[in-house]
Image (cartoon, rainbow, N blue to C red):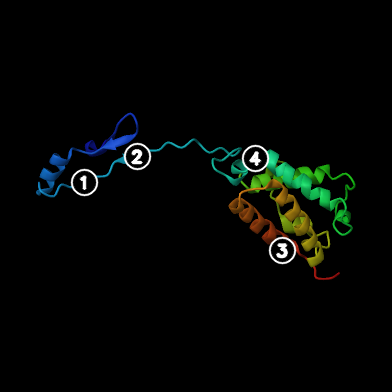
């Protein structure tokens, strides 16, 4: 049943009874009760492929994440510690597509990564490789250089960097050289 006091008009704005009627009902005509207008805002449906206002969407979608990852792998391709961790090297295209897919899914883009590869299980996937503090720091160095090329607004940059830094630290699985 519709509340007759707050029926929304065609613009989605609920109009309360007029102030005189409201004051009379409250028993105090000198002190009318004011009721706020209620705005009904329709937001587009969020789909698994492109949630509204996700970081993925805000910074440019797949193109931005692919640029980030390709720049990152420019550094990896010349890194004597990291490059041997990629079984397909020197061809890094598979790694580029996997990391791009993972990052865009994490930041609110399509869930293609999980559809193709299942749950990310990052620590498990990195266990076969010796990820020590030196490897972590090299990874972070190349990722910082890549992130800088995007020239994102400082707040977005800081949020993405904080995640990348935490993730890199979580991947360390040995302290041996």
Residue 117, visible in the rendered structure = no
Q: CA distance from mark 3 to mark 1?
A: 55 Å
Are the two marked residues, 3 and 1, in contact with CB atoms closer than 8 angstroms?
no
Q: Residue at x 77, y 58 (%)?
A: 141
Q: Which mark is residue 169?
A: 3
- In front here: 112 or 134? 134
Q: Residues within 10 Å of mark 1 (few under 14, many from 20)?
A: few
Label 3 element class: helix
Tell me the quarter of the picture where residue 52 sits: top right
Residue 27 position within the rendered picture, expressed as x and y whole percent measured from the top left:
9, 48
- Going from the N terminus, do you reach mark 1 or mark 2 first? 1
Residue 156 position within the rendered picture, expressed as x and y whole percent measured from the top left:
61, 51
Residue 42 position within the rendered picture, expressed as x and y whole percent measured from the top left:
42, 36
Q: Which residue is mark 2?
A: 39
Q: Residues within 10 Å of mark 4 (few under 14, many from 20)?
A: some
Are the two marked residues, 3 and 4, in contact with CB atoms closer than 8 angstroms?
no
Q: Which mark is residue 34?
A: 1
Q: Which mark is residue 61?
A: 4
């Amino acid at each position: 049943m519709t509340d007759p006091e707050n029926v929304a008009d065609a613009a989605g704005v609920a109009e309360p009874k007029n102030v005189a009627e409201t004051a009379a009902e409250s028993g105090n005509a000198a002190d009318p009760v004011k009721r706020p207008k209620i705005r009904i805002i329709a937001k587009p449906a969020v789909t698994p492929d492109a949630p509204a206002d996700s970081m993925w969407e805000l910074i440019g979608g797949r193109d931005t994440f692919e640029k980030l990852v390709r720049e990152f792998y420019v550094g990896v391709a010349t890194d004597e510690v990291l490059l041997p961790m990629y079984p397909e090297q020197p061809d890094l295209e598979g790694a580029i597509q996997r990391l791009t897919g993972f990052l865009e899914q994490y930041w609110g883009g399509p869930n293609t990564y999980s559809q193709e590869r299942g749950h990310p299980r990052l620590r498990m996937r990195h266990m076969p490789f010796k990820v020590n503090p030196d490897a972590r720091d090299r990874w972070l160095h190349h990722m910082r250089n890549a992130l800088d090329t995007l020239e994102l607004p400082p707040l977005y940059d800081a949020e993405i960097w904080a995640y990348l830094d935490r993730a890199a630290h979580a991947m360390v699985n040995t302290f041996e050289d």
